[in-house]
Amino acid sequence: MALFIVNNVLAVIWMGLTGTLTVTQFCIGLVLGFGALHIFRGVFGNTRYTQRGVAFFIFVTYFIKAFVIANISVIYIILFRSIQSLEPNIIVFSVRDLSEIEVMLLAHSITLTPGTTTIDYADGQLTVHALDAPDPQAVRESIDQELLKPLLGFTR
């Protein structure tokens, strides 16, 4: 947390050096500060701040990709498929090895992705409703590869 504050202070210093107080300059300062913290990470001890920052960016990228693909899929279903051809399914996804915050982030990521909704969390399992899931195992693997693994990259 201390390096996050240092990174923000470096961004504010960057804004002061450029003489421009804009969000764009602040974001540029954050990126430059992040780079400086990565280069001088040995000075601050063995910290994972930059690794987690990159992992968070990777998670957001994977989530946006899944979000866009799911939106296109749902649009296709609405426009071109009949309701009789859909195979909605209830899928159970084990989250026994995850912390409470990881379960919460995963559940919300699943719910924010169109076509899937987390409907319950009990006994170390998420219950997910999928709009069209003829193969429940494929949905589990998709959640595991596209959401869970990138999520664990920055939470652990």
Image (tube, rainbow, N blue to C red):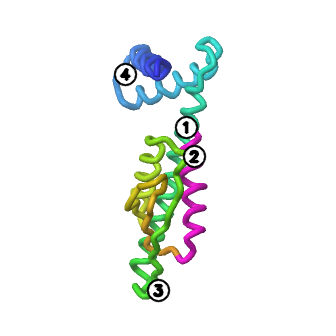
- C-alpha span from label 3 to label 2: 32 Å
The C terminus - image quarter: top right
Looking at the image, is mark 3 or mark 2 earlier in the sequence?
Answer: 3
* Residue indicated by mark 1: 154
Which residue is denoted by mark 2 in the rendering?
A: 150
Q: As displayed, is residue 86 above or below residue 152?
A: below
Mark 4 or 3: the one toward you: 3
Question: Viewed as shown, does residue 64 lie left or right of 37?
Answer: left
Residue 32: give x, y in percent of width and height.
53, 24
Disc 3, SS: helix
Looking at the image, tell me whether mark 4 or mark 3 is earlier in sequence order: 4
**Contact? badges 1 and 3 (CB < 8 Å):** no
Q: Going 39% across and 15% down the picture, which residue do you hit?
A: 16
Q: Residues within 10 Å of mark 4 (few under 14, many from 20)?
A: few
Name the one closer to the observer, 35 or 127.
127
Instruction: Look at the image and give the residue range highlighted in magenta.
Output: 134-156
Q: Which residue is mark 3?
A: 85
Left or right position of 156 against 103: right
